[in-house]
Amino acid sequence: MAIRGRTVKRTLSKTRKVGGAKKSKSARKAKRSPAKKVRRSAAKKVRRSAAKKVRRSKSAKKARKTKSKRARSPYNQFMADELPKYKKAHPSVEHKKAFAAVAKMWSARK
């Protein structure tokens, strides 16, 4: 039997006092002011980013030293070769349209 004012456990994560004086964790969380929520979330982000930097830094340095550039695909090689030629032949055409025209040349070539 519960006595008024003492805590009674309903579940592992939620507790309440008999008479409804103490609220569940989710109810307290919902009642927080927006400013407090922003401060808490900002603090969490700072902690997470600091932890990620520590984790990344050791292995990332080794990976950067041994990593080499991947070879260009045939499409990328074609675009790198043909786009400057097209722009030189058609100087008044803007980049977006020139890129589209060279891409059409690629698809026609295939």
Image (cartoon, rainbow, N blue to C red):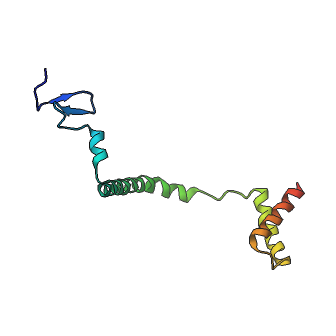
Q: Position of residue 31 (x, y in %)?
A: 28, 47
45 lies left or right of 94? left
9 w.r.t. 58: above or below: above
Q: Which residue sits at x=19%, y=37%?
A: 22
Q: Position of residue 35 (x, y in %)?
A: 31, 58
The quadrant in which residue 23 appears is top left
Q: Which residue sits at x=78%, y=58%?
A: 75
Q: Position of residue 69 (x, y in %)?
A: 65, 59
The quadrant in which residue 102 appears is bottom right
The quadrant of the rendering that contains the N terminus is: top left
Q: Nearer the viewer, residue 24 or 44?
A: 24
Q: Nearer the viewer, residue 45 or 39?
A: 39
12 lies left or right of 42? left
Q: Which residue sits at x=28%, y=50%?
A: 32
Q: Which residue sits at x=26%, y=33%?
A: 14
Q: Position of residue 78 (x, y in %)?
A: 81, 62
The quadrant in which residue 29 appears is top left
Work out which residue is located at the far top of the displayed protein and give it: 1
Work out which residue is located at the far bottom of the displayed protein and give it: 92
